[in-house]
Amino acid sequence: MMNQMLTIIKQQTEITSLIKGMNSKTDQMRVKLQDCRDVINKKGQSLQKLQESALITSPLPPNFATISSRKRAHTSNDGTERKQLAHATNDTGRGPPRTCIFCSRRHASTQCNRYNKRTSRLLRLDTENMCTYCGSKEHRHINCQHKFRQCKYCTQSHMSALCDLIFVGPRNEFCATTAEALAGNKSQQMHGKLNAVQPSR
């Protein structure tokens, strides 16, 4: 009887040590799985941010891959022939708005909400083979006559629709009120400079 008791106690100790060993291995595996999950979550978040920064909301035409890049520059996303648009940013409020060079709708290019990030606008210009200085489809930025045109918001040499000052917030999105305020402030500054230059009578 005593031998049986010793055997049972010995087996229980072996089982207890085996369970402890399995628990420690389970804990180690749990930690490794949590680490893997964290890495996957971080990769997913960075991928989502990358997709958001280069968001293009319009679909490509069905025969996009078979169209030559020269012909592609002259066709819209539905495959129809498109009018050639030169620099189409009528922000001054004079006359009806021109066609936006990014989405082809009737508003100023600086006011485009469909392409509301600088990166998506640059990507759109690139995919449509358009000049990044003036928006023309007739040439690329290397051959542009308007290289030294000044932005109406910051007076640097670039298209106003691509100015960093009109994109605000953590997602770097277009802000119409910021753009209007900058344009108003710029015109007041220019008006003040003109008055200062004119001689008094």
Image (cartoon, rainbow, N blue to C red):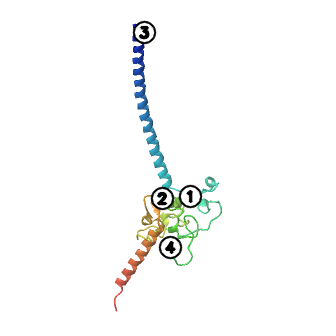
Task: State the residue lying farthest toward the front.
Answer: 1
Amino acid carrying label 2: it is Thr
Q: Residue at x 43, y 34 (%)?
A: 30
For discs 3 and 4, the disc positioned in front in the rendered view? 3
Q: Where residue 74 is drawn, which disc sits there?
A: none
Q: Would residue 84 appear left or right of 181 to someone viewing this image?
A: right
Question: In the image, residue 188 lies at what x, y percent?
Answer: 40, 78
* Image mark count: 4
Residue under pointer 1: 57
Label 2, secondary structure: give it. Answer: helix
The alpha-carbon separation of the residues under discs 1 and 4 comes to: 23 Å
Q: Please, what secondary structure does the residue beneath circle 4 have?
A: loop
State the image coordinates of residue 178 (x, y, percent, origin top left): 44, 68
Given the image, on which type of amino acid does mark 4 rest?
Asp
Which residue is tagged 3? Answer: 4
Q: Is residue 16 above or below residue 109?
A: above
Q: Which of the two labelled residues, at mark 1 and mark 4, occupies the earlier sequence position?
A: 1
- N-term-proximal mark, 1 vs 3: 3
Residue at image mark 2: 119
Graded by Cα atoms within 10 Å as few (under 14), some (14 to 19) or many (20 or more), the crowding at tag 1 reads: few
User: Do the residues bearing badges 2 and 3 touch, measured as CB atoms within 8 Å?
Assistant: no
In the picture of the structure, the residue carrying the numbered disc 4 is: 91
Closest to the camera, between mark 1 and mark 3, is 3
Q: Amino acid at mark 3?
A: Gln
